[in-house]
Image (cartoon, grey):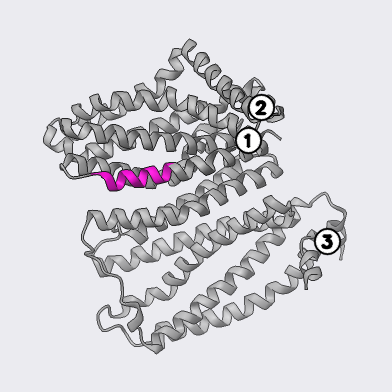
Amino acid sequence: MWKWFHKLASPPHFYRVAGVLVAWFAWPAFLLIVAGLYGGLVLAPPDYQQGDAFRIIYVHAPSAWMSLMVYVLMALSAAIGLIWRIKISHAVAASCAPIGASFTFAALATGALWGQPMWGTWWVWDARLTSELILLFLYLGYIALRSAIDDPQRADRASAVLAIVGVINVPIIHYSVVWWNTLHQAPSVTKMAAPSISMSMLVPLLMMILGFTLFFVALLLTRVRGEVLRRERSAGWIREVIAA
Amino acid sequence: MSATSSVAAGRLLFKRDLRLALRRWDQVADPLVFFLMVTTLFPLALSPELSRLRDVAPGVLWVAALLSSLLAADSLLKSDAQDGTLEQYVLSAQPLTLLLLAKTAAHWILSGLPLVLISPLVAAALGVPVDALGVVMMSLVLGTLTLSLMGAIGAALTIGLRRGSLLLALLVLPLAMPLLIFGARAVELAIAGEPAAGPLYLLAALLVLTLTLAPLTAAAAVRISID
């Protein structure tokens, strides 16, 4: 097991394994998302308060979940790369950032679309919305730092430090925003009562969350393969891969 | 190297930075003038009525302090990085963490402390009652210290980059948002005549956390950036 795991750190081996694995994640992700969308958009009954508008949750909740998970994964792989100097971990962290930023943006955009009919406004300075927005800024800062540094090794390690500092700060930011919000305004906007969700609504949601996670893994593997090709472009094994 | 000589080295570096800065006043004055200017913009943009300014005063003071600190953080390591002194720190037998802590302390004396000292004047001009000025200063002492330490990480990560100063702001601003929230809240409570200890304690807690971790992180970042 360990040996197999260690071998993954070698770029050529990773490139080959990832190429095989992509399909194993992409197809289940596709099937789950299609089934989840059908279950959520067609089969699930309309909410008795929100009508059909609640259905955006099937994209919104998985995106919001992914936005946080991808950040933690990015910081973890950056830390592994920084501590054990594993090149492939840095490639993973670099590939996580744009995907995570996209999920964060999707969560914000779908939240705004849902907010318009529900709250009568596109944007509310709600605690969750605000910390999601700050998370987007953290992603953008990470991407900006990475792109500003020309030397790839320095870019990897400097952005790794930033990702680690960021992941320590995420809970602090979240709770400070929650306190700020509750201190400032009464909770005029209450979130959906989560536990009382019916099975016909919950099952598609869980399918979507799992589908999004698998979709992310497939996307990540594809991006890391591209990143490996770019980083190892002068290595000999690339020529063999292309010739084959 | 014995521990005393490391502390002595830190003290020497602290004195050197202060002396260098005192011989070049303009650099020290820049963030302070910026702070004064930004706080002057708000009455012009909003309204000259003190009663209305008092409502926005906590936010104005804190946003201006935040921006001014970030502006100042850019100069924390710049000149040392340009003339190669920073490389000598990295190569020296003294712990880099301690040297950076000394540099950050000197930097705060030069950028944060003047801001804190002038803040009662600005706050009074924004209609903050005299009773609340103590809390304004206290919150800014805790906040600017934390900002200087966070700025050290940002400055270390962006050494020698082309658009370094803007990038530094981009990196540190999201991290500094809790400071803004608690700092502005403390001032707001003090203006309303309520006890502001709660947010001040939270600011102090953030300072302790940053003081423990930021110099280590900044040292790691300097090592990465210098290489």
For label 2, the residue is: B89
Q: Earlier in the sequence, mark 2 or mark 1?
A: 2
Q: List the residue tagged with mark 3.
A: A242
Instruction: Check residue B176 in the rendering and tell me which mark sits there, or answer none.
Output: none
Picture quadrant of residue A14: bottom right
Q: Quadrant of the N terminus of chain A?
A: bottom right
**Secondary structure state at the residue bearing disc 1:** helix
Task: Name the residue furthest top.
Answer: B23
Determine the chain carrying the residue at label 2. Answer: B
Q: Answer few, some or many: residues within 10 Å of disc 1's Cα (few below 14, many 20 plus, some between 14 and 19).
A: many
Structural distance between the alpha carbons of marks 2 and 3: 47 Å
Tag nearer the camera, 2 or 3: 2
Residue B98, image x and y in percent? 59, 32
User: Could you tell me residue B200's position as x and y percent?
Assistant: 31, 43
Where disc 3 sits, the SS reads helix
Could you tell me if the residues under marks 2 and 1 are in contact, i.e. CB atoms within 8 Å?
yes
Q: Amino acid at mark 2?
A: Tyr
Residue denoted by label 1: B222
Q: Nearer the viewer, residue B56 or B200?
A: B200
Say what amino acid the circle numbered 3 marks: Ile
Residue at image location 51% in from the left, 30% down from the top: B104
Where is residue B83, by image quadrant?
A: top right
Question: What's the residue type where badge 1 is placed?
Answer: Val
Label 3: chain letter:
A
Q: What secondary structure is the stretch in magenta mostly built from?
A: helix
Say whether residue A47 is left or right of residue A84.
left
For the point 41% across and 21% down, which residue is it? B30
Q: Is residue A117 left or right of residue A16?
A: left
Tell me if residue A19 is in the magenta stretch. Answer: no
Closest to the observer: A105 or B125?
A: B125
